[in-house]
Image (cartoon, grey):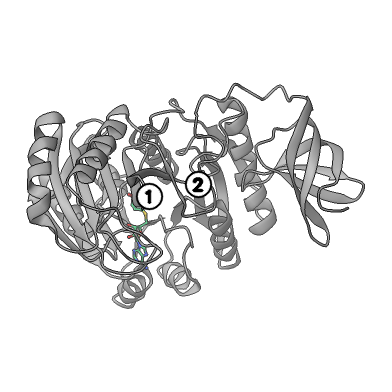
Amino acid sequence: MKKNQIVELEITDITSDGNGVGRYESMAVFVPETAVGDLLRVKIVKVLKSYCFGIVDEIISPSPDRVHTDCPHFPKCGGCSFRHISYESEAKLKEKFVYDAFTRIGKIQTEFMPVLSCEASDRYRNKAQYPVGISDEGNICGFYAKRSHRIMSGYDCRLLPENFGRISEFITEYTNKNNIRGYDEKNGSGVLRHIFIRQGYHSKELMICFVVKKDIAQRLMPLCERLKEKFEETKSIVMNINPDNTNVILGKRTVNLYGNGCISDTMCGNVIDIAPEAFYQVNTNQAERLYAQATEFAEFKGDELLLDLYCGAGTIGLSMADRVKKLVGVEIIPQAVENAKKNAEINGVENAEFICADAGMAAKQLAKKGLKPDVVVLDPPRKGCDADTLEAVVSMSPQKIVMISCNPATAARDCGVLCEKGYKAQKVRAVDLFPRTTHVECVVLMSRNKA
Ligand code: SAH
């Protein structure tokens, strides 16, 4: 196989990073934006030892999964991977991604429930972080191109509420006219780095956050006045200062420009206050269904001690609090813990306690103190739990562990570890919170083997 060679092949599978796979002689060929059943002429662009990458030269006969692509930014934009296939086929693929991860990585055979697909495949996100940069024509705001930090100009995204595009466009025009320059990642010039917007899915409350290199509060005040007038749902406007040369979006310091710095939304019937720094699931409606599935797995009787590790603003634990005797939540981001405590109070939850700490350290200490939770919920970030954390959880010997994860590969690995330590995976379910992207959540019920 050589670079620029044209080969004919059929796509037989899609990998969890969104590439179609076909075979040419003994070589696996990965081709982006394709669908299972496509018969293609493919131009080879990169050859490695046992596989290669190609791009579509011609679709000889399209897969039945294909649909008309309805976004002008696709596929150049890095946001979506699956706008060219039906949502139904995408959901089935995600069911398979989760199945493959658990059987191959975790070596787990159990009941795999059908994927819980999403009711809305567009406009489902409650949060956007528009990068702002600088070009010859002034500030440029939009979306990162696939696998790069090059900003493609654009405001409306099909995954976001429509008003987000109007807000980011308004801010870009205003900052351009008023010489508030977009940040240049290459040389650190300019000041406006990101426009971060969050809107409560149920409450519609809006938070607008300017991520800036240095304090420009005075220069932003007139813009705040305009935003409040123009976008009535605006509840909080904040400025987050991030002076560092980093990919991390938010810096350490946040300054309130208008409002109390938070917005509230409701989740699983609870009022939830969220600070800009706190994690909050981007797809509220589907997250509520995910949490409901986790609750169903736990089958609470009412006398349990529940430990919610990686609890964020407390959303999962609080949704379960009235079904258990006591809830203990652990989270590392102080603002999120503050939110969780306040959220318990607002909702009249009196049996909850929240601890600001590393999940592993807290689990170890709680175990030492003799805490015996009946159920542990684990909802770690993408990298999963570390071995020490799993060890500490196991040492408390909970009857059930409910693992929730946005990364099936690390969840499968961690559940595999729990299986070696006396637990059995009872049920696994893929839950799609991120239509059109390759991302998928999964929820797993693990129970302790009888001694
Ligand atoms: N359960 C919450 C948040 C899940 S996201 C919800 O559903 O909304 C994962 C959370 O883990 C984030 O809030 C993140 O801040 C937190 N986190 C990351 N590393 C952590 C660690 N080492 N210890 C405790 N929490 C951590």
Q: CA distance from mark 1 to mark 2?
A: 15 Å
Report which residue position mark 2 lands on: 145
Disc on res. 369: none
Name the residue type under label 2. Answer: Ala
Residue at 49 percent across and 62 percent down: it is 383
Do we see residue 130 in this rendering? yes
Report which residue position mark 1 lands on: 135
- Residue 108 appears at what percent x and percent y? 65, 54
- Residue 109 appears at what percent x and percent y? 67, 50
Do we see residue 271 in this rendering? no
User: What kind of element bears circle 1?
Assistant: strand
Name the residue type under label 1. Answer: Ser
Of the two numbered discs 1 and 2 in the rendering, the one whose residue sits closer to the viewer:
1
- Vertical relation: 250 (above or below) 258: below
Residue at 33 percent across and 70 percent down: it is 358
Is 76 or 345 nearer to us in this picture?
Answer: 76
Query: In this view, which residue lies farthest toward the right?
Result: 25
User: What kind of element bears circle 2?
Assistant: loop
Q: Quadrant of residue 10?
A: top right
Is 311 or 256 nearer to us in this picture?
Answer: 256
Side (left or right) of 128 relative to 158? left
